[in-house]
Image: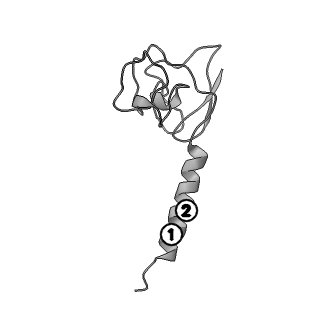
Amino acid sequence: MKMSCYKCGVEISLPGNDKPRRQDLCPKCSAPLHCCRNCRFYDPKAYHQCREPQAEWVRDKEIANFCEYFELGKGKTDHAAQKRREEARKKLESLFKKDR
């Protein structure tokens, strides 16, 4: 099974149909793999940022947790959106850059 890291976007192969274990980390950036941000139920616009109605609230969505409802997301990450935000920020900073 393949997945993408929510933080760096690297594609990771998991053995068989396994989901990541709580202690598994991304080989590139060391971000936890079994976290809300990698779950298919994660939705920043939903109540408690989770679409699973029975899941308990998790304060930090980027740390490993024990959620029993965790399912791998469909490879959707906000890595591309993050790059676009960074590029837009750089353009704004250069636009409003003060001459010294």
The image shows residue 12 at horizontal and vertical percentages of 61, 29
36 vs 15: above or below: below
Amino acid under disc 1: Leu
64 vs 89: above or below: above
Amino acid under disc 2: Ala
Q: Any mark on residue 24, and which?
A: none
Q: For mark 2, what is the residue?
A: 88
Element type at mark 2: helix
Element type at mark 1: helix
**Within-10-Å neighbours for mark 1: few <14, some 14–19, many 20+:** few
- Please say if the residues under marks 1 and 2 sit with CB atoms less than 8 Å apart: yes
Relative horizontal placement of residue 56, taking residue 91 as reference (left or right)? left
Relative horizontal placement of residue 92, taking residue 9 as reference (left or right)? left
The residue under the point 55% across, 34% down is: 5
The image shows residue 21 at horizontal and vertical percentages of 48, 18
Q: For mark 1, what is the residue?
A: 92
Count of numbered marks: 2
The residue under the point 58% across, 27% down is: 73
> Which image quarter holds the N terminus?
top right
Which one is nearer the viewer's eye here, 53 or 38?
53
For the view shown, which residue lies furthest in the left direction? 59
The image shows residue 42 at horizontal and vertical percentages of 50, 29
